[in-house]
Structure formats: structure tokens, C-alpha cells
Image (cartoon, coloured by chain):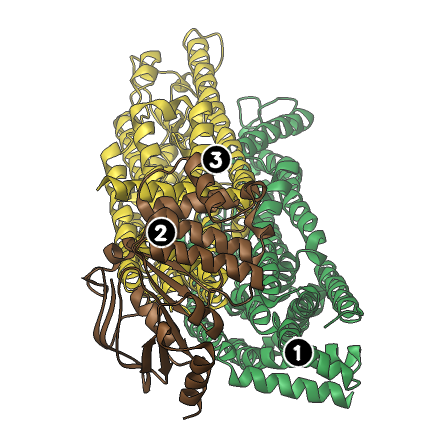
Chain colours: A brown, B yellow, C green
């Protein structure tokens, strides 16, 4: 579903990505680990068409993102680290706007409220201005948008950062639901714990290269941690 | 694809909602309402004053005429003795100032829109057989300080202030979303940045143009019946079109600067600088250039030539200038005999002097018209460099207060003056008395307005130039936005 | 004081390194230089022309052959308004008033041939001149350099640092004011010198001292004007919560003061104290003239019409004299009322000068340069006096020599001696001192504005939470 084929991205002299090849199949939750500046966010930006690759290809559902920028966005939903919404509008209004943009179809209020309930947003908050929302609430709206889109792939940037353990847990459960219904999920994260717990596969990036890739079932939490640290200090 | 139009419409609605929620919609509307209301009011007041002055001139002319006819009747019936300096049977006196005709330029249907040159050139000339030089170089009475300052009319608001509002409202269309953080959310949906920006521009331009066009048009259409006729409606359409094209140019400029700049603060500075250059610096500089390339001939020189010709006339006609005052001993000489009247030599000499002066000074006077036409041509060509010039000149032309219409008036007045002279000349030189029937036969002034097509063509030309400029910028902006890299 | 100088020097270095000063200042210098070159050339040509035309005209007057004096009045004389040396710095209202006036019999004529009527509609945007650049673009340069004076330092944290080092508020303010003044000076001093040199060189040698005094006066006025913007920029920069807000507020102020207010104030003053239309003025003047001459004629000759059958030819010269003199009072009244209404309108607007400095500097600059309406009015009055001298000499001569001939009145030919009795027209513009004295009101308003803005800046900077 999500494919990066020998993708490189250079910003002038700096090689942000160096021949990265990566595939995320439907039903997989792939966690991309690495230090800041390793190239994780750059890869996500390439999938979203926010950047063009210097070499190689990036594909979503078989479509080359660089050649079909708008069409490829129909199949992928994105939840940034900071879900920024329009503060003067309410949760429902934000959801409506993004969902209608995403699907190209009118959304009924009933359906929108249903989505918000599904992601665990307090129904009373739905009609309040987003400026009053906490980070967790905004993230839930972000997921609701992704669900409304019924996208086959999901891209997430540091989804659990800044969330308390309960909220992080809730979030992981939602992701699991999506994964088990066949969505291909790629997340970037520092959170080794949730990577092992929720992820099906893990990739470690260092200085633009994918230096390790393995299934989480093959490792324990402790092993993952020591493998990660090993690569980081090398 | 219908989903594309749906997406566009949704984006429009969303943008409108945002603008109304952050109050900028209301603020901009209130400011525009205030500006245009005040400006339209000033234009209407000035136009009313001009109309009243013209009506007054017509009434005075009619009354004066009637008085002279009445006097003629009394003189012919011997009820009153003719006054040698106010003899209604003397063609040189009747044509020379006793019963002048007024050449009046009526206000155009949309005159309140732009005061233009109407506070400098007069709308009325008093036509007599005297030389052109004596009456054609008057000017309208206006405090020179006010002339220097300029007027607060609709043309001023549109030329200078509307662009500032456009820029203030659209200098950070993309940068705001980026700096706010919503751009990533937005562009991760299948919607192009070009579509988003187009929707933002459309909503803002609709609001701006609604006020900028609706208030003046509604006010003028209500208050001036001429504006509701076919010529008026065409002019109103020209006004709407020109204003829209001008606003769109500034929107295009804002979008392209926003697209290329790194931060909204930088965009703001760059756009304000662009406005200063395009709306302030370029017009005054081009004015300087036009005057330097094609300077007006010297008025001092004209005065000298006038005097030289006058002196020659005085010399050549000196014999005639000896006054003939035989009437003093023989008052009957002041009455016509069988329709003939012997115009005193002196008055005949004055008539001839005026005619000769005009013939010989005509070329020098035409040189002024020619230089002005050349300057105007330079301005029209260089106007492409500054949209503010295009808008300002265009609006003055639509209001009928531009240089061209006054030049046209000037030419028609000159022609009418000639016609007036042709009527009285033979009567003066051959000694034919004025009768009551002559008053109906004297040349009557009619103003021949240019075809509305001319206005339409010149507006379309300016509009076209604006659209080309704006279109170029817009195309560049579109290309840039399509390739916009969010990260 | 030492610290203030250090602050000033540091800020000035910032200006010199940044791009703003160069391209904005460079633009202003280019514009000033261009306008000076073009203006100087034009003034040189027109001055030579005028002198020549004036001499020729008088020459033609005294070379008239023997003729009936009244015919001479029909030839008349032309007078040309002298162009003051400083008109290349500030053309003022010169494009909007005429330069040539014809003095003829019977009627006061107005100065004709406004240069603006020989120009396209673009003239209404303004005339490019050093004064225009200083009045309109100068404040923009100040705002551009000064809007971030305090707010940028606050945003970078250096303001707090400086204050914690013991720099006093007033040292801060004066240091930054000096820097702004210095940065401005880098642009305006060369511009001013260029303008000054152009004026002195172009002026006639006898007028150079006067021109120099006027230039000094202008320097003072523009100093006050730009000083207002310096303190205002600093004050707003200190008060505003962000650089962006400071810039927006200052620009909004400039737009209102330099662009919107002058026009609105002019329109308001025009509504409160309107000038008559040409039609109305002529009609009223004619009516009053008619009434006055009839009255005078009735008094003197017992008939309404001095030139009618009731008055014999032997009193024709006297009739002319009576007629003309009756007219003088009427014309004085009408023209005076008109010109007074102009002066009133302008005065009304000048009083706003402390809040709307652009209006104040415009009035002051024109007044000191000698291109304002007061100067024009003085010229018109002098010309009219000349005309009356000419007319009175002629009609007196008629009374003395022609009236006695009765029916042969018009066979009288005056000799050349009569023409020579009319002196050539000489009009000197007011001296620099008089011009300055006349414009104290606008200077006063500018000074008041300067004090207000300096106070504002001082108050803004002495707030506790400056950082």
C-alpha cells in the first residue's frame, strides 16, 4: 500500500534520505524510529507530496505520488504531531470541512457526530470552539477526519508525544481498530514502548538510511531498546 | 468533475465563515462603507453645484436675451432712444457682448465618480465675437491649495485606498495558514493550493467589490436619472469592470509575493513598498517625464505673440480706430434704415482686429493643444507601468471629467465661436441691422457628446492592460502555487 | 549621555548593514536628484524667457506711436510673475495658478495660464520635487527604520539585557532617536545639500542671501516634521506588543496623515466655507459693478449712463475716470472676499497641523519657499495697482487734453511722453523674514506636534513593563 523505492532526498549538500526502500502492506502498523533529523519526517513529507524526491519513487496504492499528487492523497490520511485546526470553528465544523474536502461529498451532521463519538470525543465538546480543546481532543478530531476519509493508508507523526498514558492508550486502541480493518499505517515515533506493543514492524533510521528493519514479534521490549541504542551510538 | 466544484464551493463557504468569525469581514466592510459613502457624497455635492451653475448660466442667458429683444422692440418703436454703447440694432454690439451665448458642457451621467479636471477647467464659456484669447483661458475658481491637495472622491478611494485594503486583507493568504499550522492539514487533503488560494481571493474580492461598486453605483443611479439611460448604464458597466480589474491586479500581486516570500512580515513590507512605488512614485515621475519630453509651449511667448499681433492690428486699422461720433449731433444715425445700419468704424475695426488675431494666433494656440495631446499619448503609453495611472485616468474618463472630454469641449467651443463670427461678420462689415427675427437665427450651442463606444473602447483598453498585468502575475502565482513545497 | 551615544552608534551600524536604508534611501535620493535636474533646467529657461518677454512688452508700450490714449489701454501691458528661487525645492501652488497677466482697460483681470491646465490629469497626482519626497516619502523612511527600534529588541531579549545593565530609559530613547536621526540624515543631508546648492546657484546673485535664509527656515521646518515621526515611531515601537503591530499602526497613521486627512480636511473646509463658482462670481461682480457705476454716474452727471446721450463728449474722459474709480472699490471687495475665503480655508486646515503634520509642513514649506497663495495674492495686487496707475494716468490725460476738444475728442493723439510716464512693472517677492513671520502658525503647530510626540515617546519608554 505504502511503498518507498530507493528514495533519496537531498537539500543542497545535505542528504536527508539515502536510498531508502520500505513497504507497508495493508493491516500492518510500521513504526519508524530514529533520532531527530534522521529523515523520518522527510519520508512522511514525501508520501504526502509536500516534497519531491531527488531520486527514486514514492507510491501510494500503486500510484506514483510525484506524478499524481492530488489522487494519491485520496487514499492516505495524515495526522500531524500537532493537529492544528481552525480555532474559531467548532470541532464539528472543522471535521465537516476537512471531511468534505477529503471525500468530495457532503457529510451529514449525524454522521459527523457519530465519527466524533467513535473516536471518544466528549459529545458536549463537539460544538465548542477548537481553541478550547486540549491536545488529546484535537488529536481525536484528527483521527475522526482520517476515519471519515476511509483512507486505506494512515500516516502519523509522533502520535503519542505529549499525551498522558491513558490518552496514549486510547489512541493506540483506535489505531489497532484501524489496522485490523486492513489499513496500512506508518508512524514515526520515539516511543519504543508503544512501538513494540502496537506495531507489527519496526524500522530504525539513522542519518537518512534505513539501518534496521524487523518484526516486533521477534523481539522483547528490552531487546528492542538495546538494539535501538546500539544503532544510535554506532 | 462535480466533486471539484463541490470542493471549491466548500472552500469558499469555509473561507467566508473564517473571515466573518475573525471580524475582518465586518471591519473591512465598515471601513469601505465609510470611505465610499463620504467619497460619493463629495462627488454628488460637487456635481450638483456644477449643474446648478450651468442652469443658472442658461437662465441668465435666456433672461439677458429676452431683455435685449425687449429693448430692440422699444428702440424700433421709438419708445426708447438707442444707447450708442448698447444699441440692440448694432450687430457689432449684439454679437460682441450684449447678448452672448453660453457654451456649456453638461455633466456626464457618472460625473460624481471622479472630479478629475472639472475643478480646473470651466464648464461654461461666454461666446462673443471677441478674440478667443480673451475668453478661452479663464479657469474655474478654486482655492489653489485645494487644487494641490486633491479631492476625496470615489476615484481617490479606488486608486489609492482600495489597493491598501486589498493588500492588508490578502498579504498572507498562504503564509497565515502556514504560520498558523493548518496548511499541512489542509494540503494533506486532495485539494490543490491553487484552488485554496483562488477561493480565498474570490471571497475577499467579492466583498470588496460589492462595496466599492455597489455604493457609488446605487447612489448615482438613484440620484441621477441620466445614469439610468443606455449611455449611463454602459458607463456604469465600464466603472464596475475597471474597478474589478484594478482590484484583481492587486490581489494577484499579493498572491505572488506571498507565494515567494518566506514570512508574512516580509510580504507585508514588500507589498507596501510596491504600493508606494506603483501608486505614489511612478505617477509623479511619469508626469515629470511626460512634461520633460513634450513640454508645453511657453505662455510668455504666446503673450508676446499676442501683443505683437495686436500692435500690428492696431497699426493697420489705425485709421478706422478714429471714432465716429456723428451720432452725437445726429442721433438718428443710431437707428437702422431699411434694414441697414452703419456700424461705426471703430467697432468694425475691433471686430476685424479680433478676427485677425485669431487667424494669426491660431497656430500658436494649436501648438498648446498638440503638446497636451502628445503628453497624453506618453501618459497613455507609460501608464502600463503603473496600474494606478490606468485606474485614475480610466475613472476620470468614465466620469466625463477627463482631459479628453475637456479638449473635445474646447474644440467644439472654438468651432462654435467661428460659427458665431460667421453669423455676425457679414452683418458687421456690410452694415446689416439686427432684427428681432435674427435672435432665433443666431447660432445655438449644442454639445455633441462622444459616442459611448469611444468610452467603452478606451475603458476596455485600460481594462485589458490591467488584466494583462494582473493575468501575468496570476499565471506566475498559479505556477508557483502548484509547485509549492510545504515542508 | 555617553551611553546614549553608544546606543546610537550601534543602531546606526545596524541600519548601515541592513538593506532597508540603502534601497529606500537610494530611491529617495534618485527622485530628489531627478526632480532637481529637471526643475533647474526648466526654471532657468522660463526665467530667461520671462525677463525677455517683460522687457519686450514694456519696450512695446513706450514705443507706441501717437494715438488716442484709450487705444493704448487696449494694447495694454503684460506682467509676468517672477518665479522664486526655491520653487525647484517646493513648487507649491505654482502649477495651479497662472503666471501671465494682461493689464488692460476697465477691468481687473485674473492671472491666467495655469501650468496645470497645460498638463495631463497626471498632474493631479502631484509634482515630483524634493519637498514632495521629504513630505511623503521621508516619514515612510523613518517608519521603516524605526518601527522595530524597541519591539525587535524586546522580541530578541536584548532589551531586557540592556535595562538590566543599568541603561536608563532616557538614555535609551535619546540613543535611538539619535540613531534614527542619523540614519535619516545619511539620506536627507546629501539630498538637502544638492537642493541647496541647486537653489543658490540658480538664484540671481542679489537674491542669494535671501534664498539661503529661506533654506535655513525650510531645514528647521522639515527637521520638526521628521522629528515628529521619529519620536512617534519610537513611541509606538515601545508601546506595541509586537513589531508587526508597530509597523501596521505606524503605516496606518502615515496613510491617514499624509494621504486621507489632507483631502478630507480640504473637503470639509470647502463645505464649511465654500468658494463661488466662476459663473456666480462673474455674475455678482458684474451686477455690483453695474450698480456702482450707475450710482457714481448719477452722482456726478445726473444720469445713470455715463456713456449715453446724457453726457456730452466733452466730459468723456471724466466719465471714464468716474466709471473706473467706481469700479475699483467693487473689484477690491469681490476679489478680496474671494482671496480671504481661500486664506480662511487654508488657515482652518493649518490649525490641524499638530495632529496632522503633513498639512502643517505643506503650508510652512510653501510659505517659506515663496510659492504659496499669499505670494501670489501679493503679485496680483501689485499687478492691479500697476493697472490702476496706467489707467489713471490715461484718463487724467484725457480729461486734461481731450475733453476740451468736445466733438473732436477722438482726434486727440497723445505723444510718447505719456507712455513713458507709466513706470515699468516691478514686483519683489516678500523678504525671507516676512515669509517666515507669515508662517509662524504652521511652524508653531509643527513644534507643538513635535513636543507631543516626544512626550508620547518619553511616556512609552518610561513604562515599567517595557520589555
| Alpha carbon distance from label 2 to label 3 | 94 Å
Q: Nearer the viewer, residue C216 or A125?
A: A125
| Alpha carbon distance from label 3 to label 1 | 99 Å
Labelled disc at residue B196: 2
- Mark 3 neighbour density, 10 Å: few (under 14) some (14–19) many (20 or more): some
* Residue furthest to the bottom: A234
The location of residue A175, given as percent across then percent down, is 41, 58
- Mark 3 or 1, closer to the camera: 1
Q: Nearer the viewer, residue B401 or B386?
A: B386
Q: Nearer the viewer, residue B37 or B24?
A: B24
- Mark 2 neighbour density, 10 Å: few (under 14) some (14–19) many (20 or more): many
Residue behind mark 1: C157
Q: Are marks 2 and 1 on the same chain?
A: no
Kindly tell me whether residue C92 is visible in this rendering: no
Question: Which residue is depicted at the point 50% across and 32% down?
Answer: B44
Q: Chain of mark 3?
A: C
Residue behind mark 3: C408
Kindly tell me whether residue C246 is visible in this rendering: yes
Q: Is residue A195 left or right of residue C185?
A: left
Q: Chain of mark 2?
A: B
Label 3–label 1 contact, CB within 8 A = no
Q: Quadrant of residue B350?
A: top left
Q: Chain of mark 1?
A: C
Amino acid at each position: 500500500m505504502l511503498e518507498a523505492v530507493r528514495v533519496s532526498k537531498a537539500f543542497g549538500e545535505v542528504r536527508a534520505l539515502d536510498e531508502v526502500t520500505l513497504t507497508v502492506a495493508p493491516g500492518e502498523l510500521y513504526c519508524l524510529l530514529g533520532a531527530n533529523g534522521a529523515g523520518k519526517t522527510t519520508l512522511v513529507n514525501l508520501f504526502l507530496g509536500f516534497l519531491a524526491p531527488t531520486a527514486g519513487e514514492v507510491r501510494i496504492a500503486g500510484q506514483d505520488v510525484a506524478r499524481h499528487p492530488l489522487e494519491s492523497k485520496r487514499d492516505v490520511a495524515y495526522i500531524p504531531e500537532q493537529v492544528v485546526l481552525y480555532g474559531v470553528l467548532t470541532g464539528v465544523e472543522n471535521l465537516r470541512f476537512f471531511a468534505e474536502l477529503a471525500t468530495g461529498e457532503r457529510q451529514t451532521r449525524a454522521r459527523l457526530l457519530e465519527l466524533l463519538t467513535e473516536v471518544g470525543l466528549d459529545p458536549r465538546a463537539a460544538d465548542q470552539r477548537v481553541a478550547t480543546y486540549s491536545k488529546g481532543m484535537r488529536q481525536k478530531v484528527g483521527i475522526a477526519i482520517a476515519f471519515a476519509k476511509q483512507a486505506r493508508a494512515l500516516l502519523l507523526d509522533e502520535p503519542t508525544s505529549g499525551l498522558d498514558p491513558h490518552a496514549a492508550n486510547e489512541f493506540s486502541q483506535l489505531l489497532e481498530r484501524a489496522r485490523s480493518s486492513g489499513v496500512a499505517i506508518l508512524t514515526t515515533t520515539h516511543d519504543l514502548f508503544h512501538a513494540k506493543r502496537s506495531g507489527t514492524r519496526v524500522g530504525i533510521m539513522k542519518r537518512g538510511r534505513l539501518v534496521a528493519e524487523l518484526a516486533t514479534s521477534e523481539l522483547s521490549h528490552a531487546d528492542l531498546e538495546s538494539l535501538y541504542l546500539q544503532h544510535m551510538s554506532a | 468533475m462535480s466533486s471539484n466544484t463541490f470542493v471549491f464551493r466548500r472552500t469558499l463557504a469555509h473561507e467566508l465563515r473564517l473571515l466573518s468569525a475573525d471580524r475582518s469581514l465586518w471591519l473591512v466592510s465598515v471601513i469601505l462603507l465609510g470611505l465610499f459613502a463620504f467619497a460619493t457624497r463629495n462627488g454628488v455635492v460637487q456635481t450638483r453645484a456644477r449643474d446648478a451653475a450651468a442652469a443658472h448660466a442658461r437662465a441668465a442667458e435666456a433672461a439677458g436675451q429676452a431683455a435685449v429683444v425687449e429693448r430692440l422692440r422699444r428702440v424700433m418703436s421709438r419708445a426708447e432712444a438707442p444707447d450708442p454703447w448698447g444699441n440692440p440694432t448694432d450687430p457689432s454690439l449684439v454679437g460682441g457682448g450684449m447678448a452672448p451665448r453660453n457654451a456649456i458642457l453638461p455633466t456626464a451621467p457618472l460625473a460624481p465618480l471622479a472630479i478629475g479636471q472639472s475643478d480646473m477647467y470651466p464648464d461654461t464659456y461666454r461666446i462673443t465675437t471677441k478674440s478667443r484669447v480673451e475668453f478661452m483661458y479663464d479657469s474655474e475658481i478654486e482655492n489653489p491649495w485645494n487644487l494641490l491637495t486633491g479631492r476625496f472622491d470615489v476615484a481617490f478611494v479606488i486608486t489609492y485606498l482600495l489597493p491598501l485594503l486589498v493588500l492588508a486583507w490578502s498579504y498572507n493568504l498562504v503564509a497565515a495558514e502556514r504560520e498558523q499550522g493548518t496548511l499541512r492539514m489542509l494540503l494533506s487533503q486532495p485539494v490543490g493550493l491553487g484552488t485554496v488560494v483562488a477561493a480565498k481571493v474570490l471571497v475577499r474580492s467579492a466583498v470588496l467589490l460589492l462595496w466599492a461598486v455597489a455604493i457609488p453605483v446605487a447612489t448615482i443611479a438613484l440620484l441621477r436619472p441620466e445614469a439610468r439611460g443606455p449611455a449611463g448604464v454602459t458607463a456604469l458597466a465600464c466603472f464596475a469592470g475597471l474597478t474589478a480589474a484594478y482590484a484583481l491586479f492587486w490581489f494577484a500581486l499579493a498572491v505572488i509575493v506571498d507565494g515567494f516570500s518566506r514570512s508574512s512580515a516580509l510580504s507585508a513590507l514588500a507589498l507596501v513598498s510596491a504600493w508606494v512605488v506603483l501608486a505614489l512614485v511612478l505617477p509623479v515621475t511619469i508626469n515629470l517625464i511626460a512634461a520633460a519630453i513634450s513640454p508645453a509651449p511657453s505662455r510668455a511667448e504666446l503673450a508676446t505673440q499676442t501683443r505683437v499681433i495686436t500692435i500690428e492690428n492696431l497699426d493697420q486699422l489705425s485709421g478706422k480706430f478714429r471714432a465716429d461720433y456723428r451720432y452725437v449731433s445726429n442721433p438718428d444715425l443710431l437707428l437702422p434704415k431699411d434694414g441697414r445700419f452703419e456700424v461705426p468704424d471703430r467697432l468694425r475695426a475691433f471686430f476685424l482686429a479680433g478676427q485677425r488675431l485669431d487667424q494669426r494666433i491660431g497656430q500658436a494656440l494649436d501648438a498648446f493643444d498638440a503638446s497636451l495631446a502628445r503628453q497624453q499619448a506618453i501618459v497613455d503609453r507609460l501608464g502600463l507601468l503603473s496600474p494606478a495611472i490606468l485606474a485614475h485616468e480610466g475613472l476620470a474618463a468614465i466620469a466625463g471629467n477627463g482631459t479628453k472630454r475637456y479638449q473635445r469641449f474646447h474644440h467644439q467651443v472654438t468651432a462654435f465661436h467661428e460659427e458665431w463670427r460667421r453669423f455676425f461678420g457679414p452683418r458687421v462689415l456690410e452694415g446689416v441691422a439686427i432684427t428681432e427675427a435674427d435672435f432665433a437665427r443666431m447660432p445655438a450651442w449644442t454639445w455633441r457628446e462622444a459616442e459611448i463606444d469611444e468610452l467603452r473602447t478606451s475603458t476596455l483598453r485600460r481594462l485589458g492592460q490591467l488584466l494583462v498585468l494582473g493575468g501575468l502575475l496570476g499565471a506566475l502565482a498559479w505556477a508557483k502555487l502548484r509547485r509549492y513545497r510545504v515542508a | 549621555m555617553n551611553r546614549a551615544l553608544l546606543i546610537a552608534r550601534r543602531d546606526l551600524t545596524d541600519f548601515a548593514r541592513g538593506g532597508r536604508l540603502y534601497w529606500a534611501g537610494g530611491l529617495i535620493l534618485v527622485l530628489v536628484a531627478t526632480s532637481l535636474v529637471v526643475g533647474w533646467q526648466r526654471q532657468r529657461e522660463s526665467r530667461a524667457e520671462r525677463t525677455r518677454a517683460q522687457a519686450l512688452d514694456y519696450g512695446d508700450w513706450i514705443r507706441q506711436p501717437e494715438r488716442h490714449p484709450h487705444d493704448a489701454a487696449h494694447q495694454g501691458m503684460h506682467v509676468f510673475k517672477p518665479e522664486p528661487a526655491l520653487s525647484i525645492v517646493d513648487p507649491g501652488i505654482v502649477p495651479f495658478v497662472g503666471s501671465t497677466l494682461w493689464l488692460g482697460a476697465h477691468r481687473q483681470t485674473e492671472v491666467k495660464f495655469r501650468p496645470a491646465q497645460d498638463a495631463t490629469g497626471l498632474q493631479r497626482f502631484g509634482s515630483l520635487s524634493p519637498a514632495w519626497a521629504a513630505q511623503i516619502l521621508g516619514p515612510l523612511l523613518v517608519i521603516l527604520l524605526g518601527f522595530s527600534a524597541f519591539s525587535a529588541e524586546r522580541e530578541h531579549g536584548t532589551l531586557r539585557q540592556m535595562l538590566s545593565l543599568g541603561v536608563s530609559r532616557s538614555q535609551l530613547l535619546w540613543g535611538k532617536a539619535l540613531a534614527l536621526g542619523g540614519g535619516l540624515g545619511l539620506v536627507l543631508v546629501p539630498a538637502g545639500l544638492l537642493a541647496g546648492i541647486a537653489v543658490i546657484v540658480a538664484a540671481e546673485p542679489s537674491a542669494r542671501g535671501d534664498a539661503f535664509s529661506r533654506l535655513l527656515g525650510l531645514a528647521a521646518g522639515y527637521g520638526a516634521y521628521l522629528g515628529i515621526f521619529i519620536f512617534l515611531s519610537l513611541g509606538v515601537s515601545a508601546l506595541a506588543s509586537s513589531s508587526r503591530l508597530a509597523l501596521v499602526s505606524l503605516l496606518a497613521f502615515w496613510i491617514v496623515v499624509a494621504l486621507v486627512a489632507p483631502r478630507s480636511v480640504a473637503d470639509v473646509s470647502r463645505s464649511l466655507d465654500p468658494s463661488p463658482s466662476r459663473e456666480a462670481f462673474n455674475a455678482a461682480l458684474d451686477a455690483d459693478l453695474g450698480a456702482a457705476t450707475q450710482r457714481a454716474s448719477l452722482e456726478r452727471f445726473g444720469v445713470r449712463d455715463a456713456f449715453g446721450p446724457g453726457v456730452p463728449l466733452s466730459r468723456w474722459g471724466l466719465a471714464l475716470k468716474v466709471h473706473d474709480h467706481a469700479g475699483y472699490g467693487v473689484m477690491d471687495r469681490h476679489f478680496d472676499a474671494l482671496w480671504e475665503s481661500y486664506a480662511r480655508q487654508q488657515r482652518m486646515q493649518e490649525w490641524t497641523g499638530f495632529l496632522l503634520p503633513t498639512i502643517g509642513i505643506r503650508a510652512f514649506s510653501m510659505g517659506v519657499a515663496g510659492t504659496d497663495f499669499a505670494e501670489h495674492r501679493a503679485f496680483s495686487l501689485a499687478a492691479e495697482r500697476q493697472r490702476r496707475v496706467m489707467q489713471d494716468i490715461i484718463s487724467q490725460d484725457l480729461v486734461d487734453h481731450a475733453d476740451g476738444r468736445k466733438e473732436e475728442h477722438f482726434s486727440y493723439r497723445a505723444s510718447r511722453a505719456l507712455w513713458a510716464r507709466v513706470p515699468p512693472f516691478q514686483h519683489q517677492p516678500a523678504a525671507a523674514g516676512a515669509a517666515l513671520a507669515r508662517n509662524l502658525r504652521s511652524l508653531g503647530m509643527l513644534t507643538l506636534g513635535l513636543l507631543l510626540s516626544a512626550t508620547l515617546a518619553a511616556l512609552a519608554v518610561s513604562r515599567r513593563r517595557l520589555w
